[in-house]
């Protein structure tokens, strides 16, 4: 893995990316210089959201599926100068969210005519490990376009098809999958970090596959930042070595059908 120095969001404010939204998502991520390893994706997602907000002047943010564990603390949001709304499909999850944040209880893939859903209200909608649980990804992206203001950005950090762990997750009955996850990861309790059914609707690392759908959904610009490697087989010798070799080759050859994670970004 190539070593990449962490990028601070503050440093991005001094680079050529304009605050009026005149530049492209491609130029933005080119300056971020993402590594192909998924470790970079996890370590840099928060700085990426911060940098997007600062560089494009996006101040009204909504975290889709943020629930009880939002990406930012109230103090961090205040320091960044952003107004953050926490969304979740579960009112109970939102009850545990920091009281300082606004709450929006609606299904991102549901009916936006529900009470409390305002169209064109946000500048930046972001999520992490949420969209794989959405049954209708096409409708979810369409709804994101609806709640964003003109020039707004949506970004989803997702696991992607057709990585082997997710194909297995789709094939294994949910009850058995739950038991396997709890066996391998004891910290994944129903109270603290529950496992939800995954559908992987439109969670691809292939930009060519996603762009037509995103344009139809209402976005004028779309970009996929691909990542490879994962930790699901860390406790399984031989399988781990073989999988790492496959990921290394896939990353070197840019095989998008074997990505394990991606940032899917789109601009209205």
Image (tube, rainbow, N blue to C red):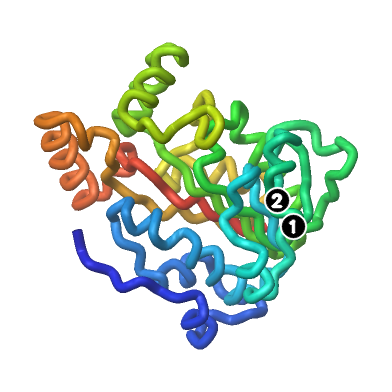
Question: Label 2: which residue?
Answer: 86
Sort mark 1 into few (<14), some (14-19) or many (20+) by Cα contacts within 10 Å. Answer: some
Residue that protrudes farthest toward the right in the picture = 115
Q: Position of residue 39 (x, y in %)?
A: 32, 54
| Quadrant in which the C terminus is drawn | bottom right
Residue 40, percent from left and from top: 34, 59
Give me the residue at 74% from left, 57% from top.
101
Q: Is residue 132 left or right of residue 141?
A: left
User: What residue is shown at x 76% (from left), y 38% (from top)?
Assistant: 106
In the image, 97: left or right of 8?
right
Q: For this view, does 83 lie left or right of residue 229?
A: right
Q: Are marks 2 and 1 in contact (CB under 8 Å)?
A: yes
Q: Which comes before the other along the chain, label 2 or label 1?
A: 2
Residue 205, quarter of the rendered image: top left
Q: Give the residue displayed 42% in from the left and 48% down from the top.
A: 262
**Element at label 1:** loop
Quick one: SS at disc 2?
A: strand
Q: Report how many numbered discs are placed on residues in the image.
A: 2
Mark 2, mark 1: which one is toward the viewer?
A: 1
In the rendered view, tell whether residue 149 sits above or below residue 140.
below
Q: Which residue lies under the disc numbered 1?
A: 101
User: Is 8 on the left or on the right of 95, as rendered?
Assistant: left
- Between residues 43 and 253, which one lies in front from this camera angle? 43
Seen in the picture, residue 152 relative to 136 is either above or below; the reply is below
Q: Residues within 10 Å of mark 2 (few under 14, many from 20)?
A: many
Q: What x and y, as percent, mark residue 237? A: 12, 31
Task: Return the x and y of residue 70 as percentages of the image width and height.
Answer: 60, 52
Residue drawn at x 50%, y 35% as measured from the top left: 193
User: What is the C-alpha distance between the residues marked 2 and 1?
Assistant: 7 Å
In terms of depth relative to the viewer, which is nearer, 230 or 253? 230
Task: Report the quarter where the N terminus lies.
Answer: bottom left
């Amino acid at each position: 893995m190539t070593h990449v120095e962490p990028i601070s969001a503050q440093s991005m404010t001094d680079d050529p990316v304009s605050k009026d939204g005149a530049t492209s998502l491609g130029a933005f991520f080119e300056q971020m210089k993402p590594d192909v390893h998924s470790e970079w994706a996890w370590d840099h997602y928060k700085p990426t959201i911060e940098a997007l907000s600062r560089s494009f002047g996006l101040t009204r943010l909504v975290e889709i599926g943020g629930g009880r564990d939002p990406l930012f603390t109230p103090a961090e949001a205040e320091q960044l100068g952003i107004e953050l709304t926490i969304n979740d499909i579960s009112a109970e999850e939102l009850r545990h969210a920091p009281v300082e944040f606004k709450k929006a209880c609606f299904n991102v893939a549901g009916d936006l005519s529900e009470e409390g859903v305002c169209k064109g209200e946000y500048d930046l909608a972001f999520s992490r490990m949420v969209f794989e649980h959405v049954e209708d990804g096409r409708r979810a992206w369409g709804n994101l376009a609806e709640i964003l203001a003109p020039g707004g950005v949506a970004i989803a950090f997702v696991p992607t098809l057709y990585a082997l762990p997710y194909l297995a997750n789709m094939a294994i009955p949910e009850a058995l999958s739950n038991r396997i996850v709890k066996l391998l990861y004891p910290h994944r309790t129903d109270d603290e970090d529950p496992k939800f059914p995954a559908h992987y609707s439109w969670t691809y690392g292939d930009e060519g596959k996603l762009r037509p759908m995103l344009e139809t959904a209402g976005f004028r610009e779309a970009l996929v930042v691909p990542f490879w490697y994962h930790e699901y087989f860390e406790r399984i010798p031989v399988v781990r070595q073989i999988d790492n070799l496959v990921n290394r080759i896939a990353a070197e050859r840019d095989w998008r059908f074997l990505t394990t994670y991606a940032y899917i970004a789109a601009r209205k």
